[in-house]
Image (cartoon, coloured by chain):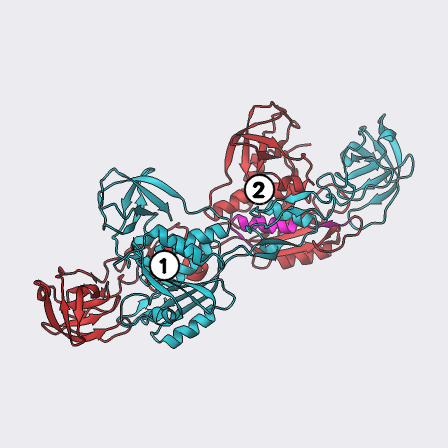
Chain colours: A red, B cyan
Amino acid sequence: MHRIPVDEYVAIVANHLRDALAPRTETVALGKALGRVTVAQVLSPVDLPLFRNSQMDGFAVRARDVASPPVTLPIAGIIAAGAAEPTSLPAGAAMQIMTGAVIPEGSDAVVPVEDTTSTGATVTVLKSRAQGEFVREAGSDARIGDTLLPAGLTLAPRHLAVLAAAGIASVDVRALPRIAVVTTGAELIAPGVEPLLGQLFDANGVALAALVESSGAVVSALVRNDDDVVASLDLALREAAVDTDLILTSGGISMGEFEVVRELLEPLGATVGTIAMQPGGPQLLGAFHGIPVIGFPGNPVSTQISFEVLVAPLLRAAAGRAPAEKRHHTVETAIDSVPGKRQFLRGRITDGNAVSIVSGPGSHLVAGLAASDVLIDIPAETTRVEAGDTVETWTL
Amino acid sequence: MHRIPVDEYVAIVANHLRDALAPRTETVALGKALGRVTVAQVLSPVDLPLFRNSQMDGFAVRARDVASPPVTLPIAGIIAAGAAEPTSLPAGAAMQIMTGAVIPEGSDAVVPVEDTTSTGATVTVLKSRAQGEFVREAGSDARIGDTLLPAGLTLAPRHLAVLAAAGIASVDVRALPRIAVVTTGAELIAPGVEPLLGQLFDANGVALAALVESSGAVVSALVRNDDDVVASLDLALREAAVDTDLILTSGGISMGEFEVVRELLEPLGATVGTIAMQPGGPQLLGAFHGIPVIGFPGNPVSTQISFEVLVAPLLRAAAGRAPAEKRHHTVETAIDSVPGKRQFLRGRITDGNAVSIVSGPGSHLVAGLAASDVLIDIPAETTRVEAGDTVETWTL
């Protein structure tokens, strides 16, 4: 049997999904933009601050009028923060002013309230202030046309804050890939239901949806197709194909008698290949009404590891995220490996540098996978790893 | 003026919020549980696999019947995956079986379909199989009562998968703190509106909501109170106090004439302190109808840094997350610092180890904060840092 090498199949999948996962832009409100990635630099449409304003609660003065304190000046008015008509500071006077309020025409300094005493009609300034002190000039933080944010930036709270401060209510970000998940198998039932003999709780729907989400994409649909009737899978895929970039399926692609995904999609041009990989050997690649379909085998460990190896790297790249961390560890016990298949064994880091095998290689061992920290990547040509040898691990 | 040291005030805030942020448990569906933290270990309510099933598409046999291949056996039936009555393998026969289907009583091995040829009525087995081969025993992955997940675990896709596989539809996780954000100031308008002279776009609502979210809590309400009328703030806080653990406010706590948060909350027992910190000196601590209130100053850089210093560490701890990363860097230019105040300056990492100052110390410089990577933490007693000296930074 010809087995396609894993790296070759990874490239085939990447090519198959190139258009579907090509960068798209969407505009989102600031309240939804945390963690999203900018597609272009954002220029300021305004000066920041918008207008010349006071840094302190105190008195707007002319600096030269308070050069030799103490000086007592008449109070010509009070300026609160908020919408205001322009005001002008009469010669030889002070105006009471609040933090953030518009500096009156003619004033060039603010004396903080703690450096004054006031009768209500007059203020005595106890300390001189230089020109410009406690005055925030318009544009002193950013000027119209300045770059507020670069392209390719992952938006953190402080980035959203400056957009808001500049009056920008929404931002162009990279769209998240929309992925539909369709699990198949006449044996599948929802968690929480009482199983009959032969029925299985569907772990793949929950797992694939969570994998999609944790790879920086969104789940556009999650459908369980629990019979072996081709017409019913056709309906499920029609449902899944709405507003989606990619459909992932689990199950129904193997060599049995009731392989519903193959039955529906092979006549539409899908191919089933055998990949030199364990778990996850059989894989389907096709399309449904123009939407690419990647079909994983139905065993839950196969499904999860297939996603990690074939799809997660593409989604992480599309979301501008780093790929899964790969490290090197020494194995605690020897490993025999099937020749010609790249093995992804489940491992747990036992101290900083050693890794031990968790559970077995069986693709149904979901508890074993849950108990592991890493996948241990054994190359196809390796048949034995000795205790103490170094292996590459993928951090889960 | 007595200034409260930052560390002392951090402890006061932590104490004030102890009950509000005490761990609570909530039960969430698996589809909402990604990234949440388990509060107790989860034991398996079932054996996994639930029943003895086939690992392969092939033929269920007795191992001793196929010990000397080739052997031709009559096919006594076909067993698909899915709900099924128990079946029994007649002596000297084989039954066709699909992956995941119930192994018939009497069978102790499965021969994969690729190691057979079949006429439809009979199957010729070309390769012997040992007892137990390709048979997944019930409970071979986990047994009833086994620990599937430990307490305190951050739920990843593989953890949700094993819960689903065991038929568990929901999980007890640490509840997320619910935080209401109320921004105040007669000058505030929403981003996107055309400002009049003296009006400011509200950056604090967007910033605090994003900071709450990125600290692992949820925003229970986001209210802008854009006038200086105490009765209207009272209404805003009543709205914010519903189903919430903590109310954060910005603005209205300073020394000006129109300090609406002070005016409402001081008569209810709130205190306003001056913290030995820049930016963010004035701070309010109080309660409203039994819900604790932390009142930040209104300048947007003060608000954001106050949150980082006073509240984010508590929320991160409540969410089981690590505190913000603190590192050491050498400064590129000398820094003069106000004695008696701990300064949080904005910095940018220029190469692996050096940090340069970005923008100025002014608490209105939102573009400067957006352009920075780190806060540079200058202790209160330090008045000057020389170029090349080491400083502590907080990664933003």
Picture coordinates of residue B69, whole percent (x, y):
84, 27
Q: Residues within 10 Å of mark 1 (few under 14, many from 20)?
A: many
Residue named by callout 1: A161
Return the residue nearer the eye: A67 or A190: A67
Eye-nearest disc, 1 or 2: 1
Amino acid identity at mark 1: Ala
Q: Chain of mark 2?
A: A
Residue B51 included in the magenta stretch of the image: no
Amino acid identity at mark 2: Glu
Quarter of the image where one finds residue B365: bottom left
Return the residue nearer the eye: A99 or B289: B289
Q: Is residue A20 left or right of residue A248?
A: left
Q: In the orientation shown, which residue stands out farthest toward the right?
A: B91
Let me know if marks 1 and 2 both belong to one chain: yes
Picture coordinates of residue A307, whole percent (x, y):
59, 44
Label annotation for residue A303: none
Circle 1: element type: helix
Q: Residues within 10 Å of mark 2 (few under 14, many from 20)?
A: some
Relative vertical location of residue B380 with respect to residue B106 in this rendering, above or below: below
Return the residue nearer the eye: A353 or A14: A353
Q: In the orientation shown, which residue stands out farthest toward the left?
A: A68
Q: Which residues are magenta?
A: A199-218
Q: Chain of mark 1?
A: A
Picture coordinates of residue A64, whole percent (x, y):
8, 64
Relative vertical location of residue B15 with respect to residue B144 in this rendering, above or below: below
Q: Measure the alpha-carbon separation of dots 1 and 2.
A: 35 Å
Residue named by callout 2: A308
Quarter of the image where one finds residue B352: top left
Picture coordinates of residue B104, whole percent (x, y):
85, 41
Examine the rendering and report whether any part of residue A293 can be seen: no
Q: Residue at x 37, y 52 (%)?
A: B309
